[in-house]
Amino acid sequence: MRAARPEIEVRAADVPTGSAPKPQVSGTERILYGTLGILAVTGLVAPDRFNLAPADRLVEVAFLAATVLLARRVGSWFVLVPAGLYVFLKTLLLVLYGSASLPDFLLAHKAFIYLAALAFFVGRSVFYGRRLAQFTTFLVAVFLAKYGYSIALGLADRPGIYLENNFELILLMGLVYLAYPYLGARRDWVFAALAITVLISGSRSAALGLVCVYLFRYVKTSNRTWPLHVAGVAVVSHAVLALFSARAEQDGTQLDRLVFFQTFLAEVRDWPLWQFLTGAFPLTPLSPGACGSLSFYVELFSKTDPGVCYSVIFHSFLMRAVFDHGLIGLGLLYGLLWWGLRRSGTPARDALALLGVITLSALSVSAFNSVFATIVLALAMGLDRRSAPDADDGPGVDATSVTRSRRNRDLRTGPVGRVRPGRGRRPVGTPV
């Protein structure tokens, strides 16, 4: 006869429950949420401009300060070392053989500098999910209010809170995506407000990102209503196409991004194959003809030499990255970001969604070179996933997360409050 399995009696307090106590607000949350929140208000009350303050610079300072708070411990050396070595080697080449100025160099290599900073967020669990949901709801409301009254009153056809909406809407979409499991019953209302904000913004790259967010958040075969969500893709896509058509009629002539792409092709047409892998020497200025054809964007010329322009004038991060870093550098960036996200516990589906939204933005603007996209990645890497939504969170909770949470508790606990040997917590007084 098979012997019965020994069972250990424990107190009720020793048995893990579905809801953990709410952790205190971290310094990182205070800095990032506080700065973004205050600047959102100063942007809301500035009808004739983006913001009353230099918002982009202040957000950059806030991200740097948040990184310094975490600098006592590295979240992932596997991210920090390659990113740091890459920037170091590029800097060494510039100092020994180049002639470009340091500000121009830093602007071209921001994505890898941000990548090194993100290494400190990997797996640190400094962002609490429910606080993220509260802050996201507030920010979506502010964005919708500012964009709404700006369009309704004819104050701006491309409104913004912090700066140009091509950049800041990456942040808003990323926040909604990450906060979605913690939003409870208001999740669909928050997404609807996001969709309205994006569609009235006039930003084509953000509109494409909205489709990506909808696909990854709503279209799941495990959901019984997935056919309705597939139909929703058609509705969202139709609205996006309408935005593209409206912008095309407004712009009238050739798309400016097509002009940038044609200039890019002209600059690399004589490159040997190996140079597409390594990119140009840091920093290689564009030809005088290319700078002349893009002279309308004179504010993007060299910070120290007004007659010289670099790849930043292409706008699109993907074109800039191929020109400056090559396919190897671009692959290194994506590979380390993927590693950092997965190492932090980000599900593969969510990692694909976030990188997809930022990549769609990279077709048009600086994307990974932007602090707003970097903050989204920092939140994903530093999110406390131990506070995942559970059955006690009320309506609107994702069924898959509830099932997973219950399954994890079943593995830890046996029937009638008993703990299986080797899986439960050690009772008080038991020798170590």
Image: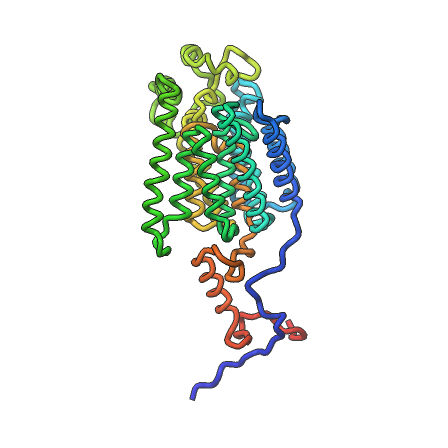
Q: Nearer the viewer, residue 278 or 248?
A: 248
Is 398 on the left or on the right of 146, as rendered? left
The answer to whether residue 83 is above or below residue 395 is above
Q: Position of residue 221 (x, y in %)?
A: 34, 53
| Residue 244 position in % (x across, y down) | 36, 28
Residue 17 relative to residue 209: left or right: right
* The C terminus, quarter of image: bottom right
Q: Can residue 78 be seen?
A: yes
Q: Residue furthest bottom?
A: 1
How many marks can you see?
0
Compared with 379, 407 (above or below) is below
Residue at left 54%, top 23%? 105
Question: Residue at 61% of width from left, 71% of height from top?
Answer: 426
**Residue at image point 45% right, 55% down:** 398
Percent of width and height locating residue 265 = 35, 20
Q: Quadrant of residue 14?
A: bottom right
The answer to whether residue 164 is left or right of residue 1 is: right
Percent position of residue 19, x then y: 57, 61
Q: Nearer the viewer, residue 170 or 41?
A: 41
Q: Looking at the rendering, in which quadrant would you find the N terminus?
A: bottom left
* Residue 278 appearing in the image: no
* Model colouring: rainbow
> Residue extending furthest front?
153
In this view, 135 is above or below 419: above
Q: Is residue 234 above or below residue 159?
A: below
- Looking at the picture, tell me which residue is in the foreground, 234 or 209: 234
